[in-house]
Image (tube, rainbow, N blue to C red):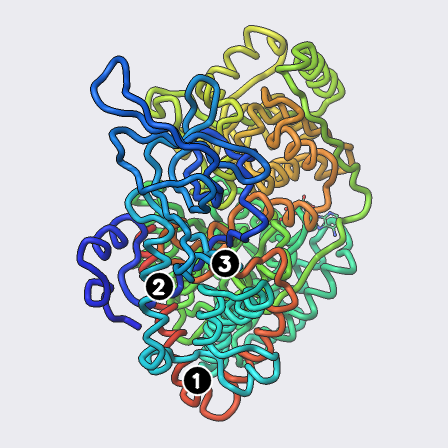
Amino acid sequence: MDTPLTRVLGPKTAKVMAEQLALHTVRDLLRHYPRRYARRGEMTRLDGLEVGDRVTVLAQVKSVSTRRMQQRRGTLTEVTVGDGAGSMRLVFFNNRHAHLDVGEWGLFAGTVGLWRGDKQFSHPDCHIITGDDDDWARALVPLYPASKDVSSWVIQKSVKLLLDDAHSLEQLLEDPIPATVRDRHGLVDLATALRQKHRPENQEQVDSADERLKWDEALVLQATLAARRRAAALEPGIARPGRPGGLLDAVDAALPFALTDGQREVGEELAAELAREQPMNRLLQGEVGSGKTVVALRAMAQVVDAGGQAALLAPTEVLAAQHARSLAAILGPLGRAGELDGDPAGTRVALLTGSQKAAVRREARAAVADGSAGIVVGTHALLQEGVEFADLGLVVVDEQHRFGVEQRDALRAKGTRPPHVLVMTATPIPRTVAMTVYGDLETSTLRQLPAGRGGVSSSVVPVGEKPAWLDRAWARVREEVAAGRQVYVVCPRIGDLEDGGKGDDGPDDADGAPPPEEKGGTSDKRPPLAVLDVAEGLRNGPLSALRVEVLHGRMPPEEKEARMRAFAAAEVDVLVATTVVEVGVDVPNATVMVVMDADRFGVSQLHQLRGRVARGKHAGLCLLVTEAPSTSPTGQRLAAVAATTDGFALARLDLETRREGDVLGAAQSGRRSNVKLLSLLDDEALIAEARVEATTLVEQGRGLADHPELAAAVAALALDERATYLEKA
Ligand code: ADP
Ligand code: MG
């Protein structure tokens, strides 16, 4: 399977396949599946073509005429082809065409162009289906993702070459799905599946091949995750049981509110797991504002009570600082052990971020290393070498979607023995994603919001269609401020000298951005709105009577911190910010979130931003300002966000608008990717079954050692993941 294509195909073909389609080995080519199939008698519709599409169509030659050109030397051949649904013109210069006769069927590939209002192909690749060409007389003709110099049928022929070598194919293929599993789920073997996928005789064969090949993808992924879970389970950690009369009890006594039922239940679950030697690996998902921080704090307190340290990893400096501040506030004297007014029975909260002054950081590191800081809050800076813990017992990762497995592992490695791990996310994760991306974690969910929340209503403000609505929006902002409330205005860009018109801010957020094909809601016309410009405009315009301040990632850390503090203390009415306020920021008096150029943000980002308001008893308002027409896909996406606050529904919408590859963090399209057929949206049942099978395979007997083919596929995936990670780093 690893045989280079240069050894089985012509050198030229192999070269362009590698260059343009990243197909290097026999495996790559066999796993380069047809995108779809052309059916004889049910043509690819010519009437649906868009100018600029690179397509392959199956059509019949209707007319052929060749004439001498008037302006230039040479001849022009015009061919009209039709497919029942539409027709189009093919043009060839100087007889550069395969011999085409009226009535013949053929496959024509090219880029759809426009000439005098009609769609046409200029000298397309042609393949006439002749009577003895049994490949093309098939009921289903595979159409492959092609490139400029590698047409669909070059791929088809090359695949055929591999498939026809029946003997060696059977030997080459190592089927990663054990026969028992195949039998149980009625799956065909790999060689059969590949034959059926590339050269099907009917739709049933395509379907059974798809089912089987999806299983490949799901099983290998799930086996990888099961192996990871097993390895983690085999490495004992340290039990961190609770202690009556300790920090946890003090925290509970100090909380200004009663825990919700959900918080209590999850709390008990965590307490029990922390008390075990086997390291906890748990994902806590909970709606924005459902109170995850308290749950984490209580778990951290238990670990401190047991003599260990707990680290809280946050995605942004703003959030890390806020966490440190609110933990210190809840703990009071218990968080200042060793200080004059501290409680000696307590501990200390250390903050570690990348932008701290050297002296501050040195002091914090020392407190982490000697164990006097029981609770350590930080950003990526926590992961750095040189940060050493006296006894790291629990790692809490806030807003996990910002961190990869590798980062989690880097922190985990800082314990002498594997610490317990709690991962928290406010982006509700559809079950399939939980089973795949986070499949090495057990999950808990907080569905309930604390009682007495005002709720948020959301509206799209389509400034293109209703410019006056924006004035009304600012009027609403003035009213809220007059009533004593506060407001966020979020923009996609900072607007200082450095960002040159396109810079984004905040944590690296590949996963939150809108789908690429949807970008350009406004970007074609002008650069995205910027914090500094918008703040200026508001100060000199509709909000001139209010205290308007800015916040963005390129401000010096102390200034950021001071600004956030001032906003939290209600000394600022309107905070104009980038997505630095996206996650976690908690100012209960803020009630309005205005998102400028909302089309620039992804679904889950918008949901997160909206989660910044109505965190207290006052009702909230979220305004999504956009120039995108309300009927455009972008406008409809925004309308969908406005229509529901159900995070799970939105997570599904997010999944629909993003490609699987993005969700899984796989390499870019066209590159080698492990998930080609599997859909996180549609294949939930299959993924669940594969998960069960994979777990059994990994945990029974000698585990993967009993299934060398599967083990090899798992190893290949791990290698691929590493490569992807390195590419990104
Ligand atoms: P998230 O889950 O989004 O991280 P937070 O932990 O920031 O939410 O909590 C949101 C707000 O709700 C905070 O101001 C927090 O103090 C408050 N809160 C948390 N739990 C409760 C509760 N049981 N009752 C009332 N308010 C709560
Ligand atoms: Mg939070």
Q: Which residue is rendered at x = 71% and y = 25% of the image?
A: 485
Which circle marks residue 283 in the picture? none
Comparing 692 with 551, the one in front is 692
Compute the Cα span from label 2 to label 3: 58 Å
Question: Looking at the image, do the residues carrying marks 1 and 2 touch, with CB atoms under 8 Å apart?
Answer: no
Label 3 crowd (10 A; few <14 / some 14-19 / many >=20)? many
Compute the Cα span from label 1 to label 2: 31 Å
Q: Position of residue 2 (x, y in %)?
A: 27, 71
Q: Quick one: label 3 or label 1, which is nearer the N terminus?
A: 3
Compute the Cα span from label 3 to label 1: 39 Å
Q: Amino acid at mark 2?
A: Val
Q: Amino acid at mark 1?
A: Leu
Comparing 488 with 249, the one in front is 488
Left or right for 135, reference 347: left
Q: Quick one: label 2 or label 3, which is nearer the N terminus?
A: 2
Q: Looking at the rendering, in which quadrant would you find the N terminus?
A: bottom left
Mark 3 or 1: the one toward you: 1
Left or right for 99, reference 105: left
Secondary structure, mark 2, is helix
